[in-house]
Image: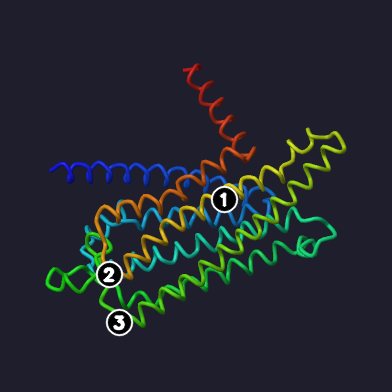
Amino acid sequence: MDSLSSLSAIENILYFQAGFGVLANMFLLVFYVFIILGHRPKPMDVISCQLTFVHIMMFLTGENFWLADIFESLNIENDFKCKATFYTKRVMRGLSICITCLLSVFQAVMISHRNSFLAKFKHKLKKYMINALFYIWSFNLSFSSNLIFYVSGFNNMSQNNQLKVTKSCSLLPMNYIIRGLILTMTTSRDMFLVGVMLTTNAYMVIILHRHQRQCKHLHSMSHLRASPEKRATQTILLLVVFFVVMYWVDFIISSMSVLLWMYDPVIMIVQKFVVNAYPTIIPLVQMSSDKRIINVVKTGILSATRFFFKT
């Protein structure tokens, strides 16, 4: 009884996390759409807008949100529901790591020294960005398609052979070669992207350190503190480090579960919490570091306060 009540309490936390994450990302998405449509957006705004949309979809396709209830209310076949939601979740997970990596690479290009190798790409960032996003979406849509054949609605009759991954969905039995091949492909992709992120992060740290030393030498520390490039770089550094930590926790849990062909309900909940942690935290970090968003929030609060006192 105690274990059931504790599981229920943890699930309530997941509901709160998902609800809060969707609201925060929706606010950020609306902000970026207005910036892109109505003003002169920065190259990073388009990438951040894509990442925000991906994170909203990650929450909506999760088991702990209302999209799962909509499937049930429409009486959609459980098998199709599982294939659609599982495929979408895997695509969004892949897009999240790819777009985070792209954000890190582009920021490294943006702050690179004019004499460096990366500087020649600065003037063509918009063109490269659109092409990169197109290839990233195409790659992830095709990369995760193989899992559709191994996902099914959970069947109590073959409970021993299926790996239950949600309350109503499971992975069908697959031989060790296919299982190892899928795991190797996914691991290779993710390891490469994490390696690129860590490399660009190290490059940005070196540039910031050199910039800080130069500013100290020129007695202009105030310019360094006020630099938008520095704030943006520090934000991306923080996001990438947090993402890599959360990714490795998720990767270890997922890999062990697939290799051992066993999922524990408590471990499943912990994994969901870890997977949702990054898309929940990222909008808060972006809001607190982007002066444009801070100004919008301040303006909104002032307008609401004036309206309240007038009435």
The answer to whether residue 67 is left or right of residue 203 is: left
Amino acid marked by disc 1: Val
N-terminal-most mark, 3 or 1: 1
The reply, left or right, for residue 175 in relation to residue 31 is: left
Please report the residue visible at 69 percent of the width from the left and 50 percent of the height from the top.
205
Q: Examine the image and state in which quarter residue 234 appears.
A: top right
Per the image, the residue denoted by label 3 is: 175
**Callout 3 environment at 10 Å: few (<14), some (14 to 19), or many (20+)?**
few
Q: Which tag, 2 or 1, sits closer to the chain's start?
A: 1
Residue at x-position 74% and y-position 40% = 227
Which residue in the protein does label 1 denote? 33
Per the model, the C-alpha gap separating discs 2 and 3 is: 11 Å
| Crowd around label 2: few <14 · some 14–19 · many ≥20 (10 Å) | some
Residue bearing mark 2: 261
**Relative horizontal placement of residue 271, taking residue 125 as reference (left or right):** left
Q: CA distance from mark 2 to mark 1?
A: 43 Å
Q: Are marks 2 and 1 in contact (CB under 8 Å)?
A: no
Q: Amino acid at mark 2?
A: Trp
From the top left corner, tell me how far across and down residue 291 is, in percent: 64, 37
The image shows residue 190, relative to residue 272, as above or below, that is below
Q: Amino acid at mark 3?
A: Asn
Which quarter of the rendering shows the N terminus? top left
164 relative to 25 in the view: left or right: left
Q: Secondary structure at mark 2?
A: loop
Dot 1 falls on a residue whose secondary structure is helix
**Residue at the spot x=37%, y=47% of the render?**
18
Residue 52 on image: x %, y %: 51, 52
Give x and y (percent) for residue 235.
61, 45
Dot 3: what SS? loop
Disc number lying in front (2 or 1): 2
